[in-house]
Image (cartoon, helix red, strand yellow):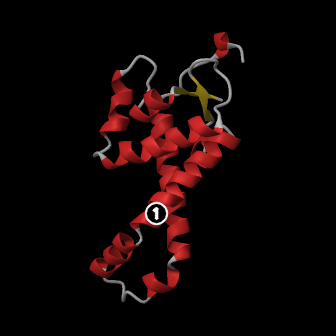
Amino acid sequence: MNNENLQLASMPSRIIAFIIDDLLISLVFVLLFWDQITSSDGQLINMLIIISEHVIQVLLLKFVYQGFFVWYYGATIGKIVTKIKVIDYNHFGRVSLATSLIRSMTRIFSEYIVYIGFIIGFFTDGRQTLHDKISRTLVVNA
């Protein structure tokens, strides 16, 4: 890949991609646990209990979704929609499966430490989040 044509993805496009991806994960969760959700009588507390009972499944779903899409396509569905992609920091090419899985795992960690891992991206030269730094990736315009 020619690194002269690379342009870092903007933070707004990354935020929109994040929102799209989280909405998709939420939709899949609702579809998977539809029977339990509809039997919760629409009470918020009952729905929160259902979510907390299945937190491992949600984390696994996020891990597999992020890991697979970034490895196979270079981008999640949210990133595809916003026309951005993840590349390897060292050779500016496609990320390996191992790199993608490391990025996916540390992305979940970034999310669960009050999004501090994401906020770091606003203050680094390469707009790298914590999970980008750990996995040695960049997010660029596709």
- Residue 86, given in percent of the width and then of the height, sits at 59, 32
Q: As rendered, which of 71 and 116 lies closer to the eye?
A: 71
Q: Is residue 120 left or right of residue 1?
A: left
Give the answer, above or below, for where 126 lies relative to 43.
above
- Residue 137, given in percent of the width and then of the height, sits at 53, 27
**Residue at the image position 58 percent from the left and 18 percent from the top:** 90
Q: Is residue 100 left or right of residue 93?
A: left
Residue where numbered disc 1 is placed: 58
Q: What amino acid is at disc 1?
A: Val
Query: In this view of the protein, can residue 90 be seen by the observer?
Result: yes
Q: As rendered, which of 63 and 118 lies closer to the eye?
A: 63
**Residue at the image position 62 percent from the left and 41 percent from the top:** 70
Image quarter in which the N terminus is found: top right
Give the answer, above or below, for where 42 lies relative to 123.
below
Dot 1 crowding, Cα within 10 Å, few <14, some 14–19, many 20+ = some
Q: Is residue 117 left or right of residue 14?
A: left
**Residue at the image position 49 percent from the left and 28 percent from the top:** 10
Q: Is residue 72 left or right of residue 114?
A: right
Give the answer, above or below, for where 62 lies relative to 109.
below
Give the answer, above or below, for where 125 lies relative to 26.
above
- Residue 61, given in percent of the width and then of the height, sits at 53, 60
Number of marks: 1
**Residue at the image position 66 percent from the left and 29 percent from the top:** 142
Q: Residue furthest front?
A: 98
Secondary structure found at label 1? helix
User: In the rendered image, which quarter is residue 98 located in?
Assistant: top right
